[in-house]
């Protein structure tokens, strides 16, 4: 049921969603890792999707792809960025995965003809997966974020599994509730009652939290802390104030001030293996806050609008990658969202106010001509252009149309009847599409790319071969590669066998930075290790601005 002596910290949410369970979990993982303990972070998503791959980014946010190719929730990206390492597929779990596994076992008679029930069979499958994650990562402590909010029907089985684990190993399991304390404008006073209700709801599951992380727009005072301690039966020193901060990367530093890392080890009856050192992390956070020259980056995409609001989470990793490279280069990227649909009918000169343009990944025809127009504008006006996955396709289509004269060039994804499919579906994907198989069937995960000596890409990486994460089913059509090369487009990154085009660029003599990559470099950018392509892009942006 559990590794000998392994420790588990379950993180649940109270009052409402979006209060920062993922950042709190990431921060706790970092605090424990800095104290000398190998940690793995697990995200539990209670929805019935088998993975996050088929979900609309406008509704759910970015799909984060692991090195293994598993399509996951965006919290996994925060986990990797905070821990500064890759996580495995065992560190992600959905209700769909769990139920699918149980049903497959039942069909194979692995339960010996028993009647299969949510308890114990589904619950025990959850526990098996938690153990497998700890074994695979060879960790000492697992921090498990249970998605949703206490009281949700969907996550009840996961909380039940955690309760049973604590029943068996009372010294090895902790519960942390991340709850919201509102400050109603008409009252001007922080209210603890919603969190008290959330804790009582958790109590009704048979679970008593050991820690409360109190989220609010301002710091919690001692009077509210004492009130929560009395009514929630949690030690006052284990009630951690978590006010809004300038950046999510401030959170572990704030937790460190409240000695949360030491308190967690004390509760788990573990010694501190080494002194935590946040020197580099603190320096990075200070850079983010410092006054720096700014550059304006336009992100041309389509996953923005949700009602009257803009959902930047659809491109979360792109935003973070720009932050990391900006801190490295002492420049502040100011991001503005450009709806590609507006460029289809609007004045393309609206792009003139941007110092650089990024066209990120995506699917479908919405706004595609606007993205192609953006690529053309950047090429002709020497504006740094960075195309990510779909953004590379736009670069190649634009080049084929307006430089090679293939006026009807297109991607097979949008126009299967195009006479010049410069972007075509991968052969192995064609059959899957015909069968209606979309989930988990793309080219997913890490693949090697061989770089052209002396190219912008090779100089940026400083290496001849790199490994990057992919998420796509369309590629540059090999039948057009030579023609594009003869027309001046440089394919500076290819698969090791030279068949698949991974990076396209124009020479520095032609353009200061005009580059697209088939992969998603943003997925491997880290706070203390910015991605070289994002840094190269920002260097070109700064140089152009002068």
Image (spheres, helix red, strand yellow):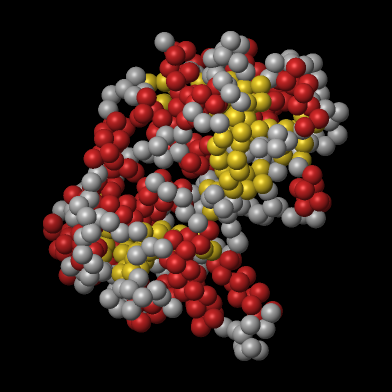
Identify the residue shown where x is 66% and y is 37%. 495
In this rendering, does residue 340 appear at all? no
From the top left corner, tell me how far across and down residue 189 is, in percent. Answer: 21, 52
From the top left corner, tell me how far across and down residue 370 is, in percent. Answer: 65, 26
Rendered image quadrant of residue 517: top right
Residue sitting nearer the eye, 419 or 221: 419
Q: Is residue 217 left or right of residue 511?
A: left
Identify the residue shown where x is 17% and y is 59%. 224
Identify the residue shown where x is 39% and y is 54%. 22
Q: Is residue 439 left or right of residue 232?
A: right
Residue sitting nearer the eye, 68 or 225: 68
Identify the residue shown where x is 61% and y is 36%. 449
From the top left corner, tell me how far across and down residue 6 is, in percent. Answer: 35, 70
Q: Is residue 23 above or below residue 126?
A: above
Q: Is residue 16 above or below residue 532?
A: below
From the top left corner, tell me how far across and down residue 195 is, in percent. Answer: 29, 63
In this rendering, does residue 281 appear at all? yes
Rendered image quadrant of residue 494: top right
Q: Is residue 121 left or right of residue 396?
A: left
């Amino acid at each position: 049921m559990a590794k000998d002596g392994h420790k588990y910290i379950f993180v649940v949410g109270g009052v409402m969603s979006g209060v920062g369970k993922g950042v709190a979990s990431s921060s706790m993982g970092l605090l424990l890792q800095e104290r000398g303990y190998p940690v793995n972070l697990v995200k539990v998503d209670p929805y019935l999707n088998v993975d996050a791959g088929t979900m609309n980014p406008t509704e759910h946010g970015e799909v984060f792809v692991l090195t293994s190719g598993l399509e996951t929730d965006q919290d996994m990206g925060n986990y990797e960025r905070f821990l500064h390492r890759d996580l495995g597929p065992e560190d992600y779990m959905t209700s769909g995965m769990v139920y699918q596994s149980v049903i497959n076992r039942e069909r194979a008679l692995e339960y010996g003809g028993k009647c299969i029930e949510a308890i114990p069979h589904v619950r025990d499958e959850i526990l098996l997966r938690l153990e497998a994650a700890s074994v695979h990562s060879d960790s000492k402590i697992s921090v498990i974020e249970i998605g949703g909010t206490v009281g949700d029907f969907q996550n009840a089985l996961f909380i039940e599994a955690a309760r049973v684990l604590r029943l068996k190993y009372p010294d090895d399991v902790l519960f942390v509730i991340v709850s919201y304390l509102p400050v109603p404008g008409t009252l001007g006073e922080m209210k603890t009652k919603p969190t008290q209700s959330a804790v009582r709801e958790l109590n009704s599951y048979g679970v008593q939290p050991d820690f409360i992380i109190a989220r609010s727009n301002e710091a919690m005072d001692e009077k509210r802390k004492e009130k929560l301690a009395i009514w929630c039966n949690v030690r006052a020193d284990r009630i951690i104030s978590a006010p809004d901060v300038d950046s999510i990367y401030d959170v572990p530093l704030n937790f460190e001030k409240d000695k949360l890392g030491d308190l967690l080890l004390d509760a788990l009856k573990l010694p501190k293996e080494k002194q935590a050192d946040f020197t580099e992390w603190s320096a990075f956070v200070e850079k983010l806050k410092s006054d720096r020259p700014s550059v304006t980056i336009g992100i041309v995409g389509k996953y923005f609008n949700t009602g009257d609001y803009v959902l930047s989470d659809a491109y979360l990793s792109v935003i973070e990658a720009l932050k990391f490279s900006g801190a490295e280069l002492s420049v502040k990227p100011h991001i503005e969202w450009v709806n590609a649909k507006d460029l289809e009918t609007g004045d393309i000169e609206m792009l003139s106010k941007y110092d650089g343009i990024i066209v990120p990944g995506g699917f479908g025809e919405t706004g595609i001509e606007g993205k192609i127009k953006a690529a053309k504008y950047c090429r002709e006006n020497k504006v740094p252009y960075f195309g990510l996955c779909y953004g590379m396709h736009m670069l190649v289509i634009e080049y084929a149309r307006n430089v090679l004269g293939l006026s009807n060039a297109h991607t097979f994804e949008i126009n299967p009847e195009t006479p010049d499919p410069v972007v075509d579906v991968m052969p192995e994907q064609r059959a899957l599409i015909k069968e209606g198989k979309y989930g988990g069937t793309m080219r997913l995960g890490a693949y090697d790319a061989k770089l052209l000596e002396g190219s912008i890409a090779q100089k940026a990486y400083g290496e001849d071969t790199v490994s990057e994460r992919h998420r796509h089913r369309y590629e540059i059509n090999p039948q057009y590669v030579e023609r594009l090369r003869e027309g001046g487009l440089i394919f500076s990154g290819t698969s090791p066998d030279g068949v698949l085009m991974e990076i396209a660029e124009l020479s520095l003599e032609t353009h200061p930075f005009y580059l697209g990559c088939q992969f998603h470099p943003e997925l491997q950018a880290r706070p203390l290790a910015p991605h070289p392509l994002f840094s190269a892009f920002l260097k070109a942006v700064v140089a152009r601005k002068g």
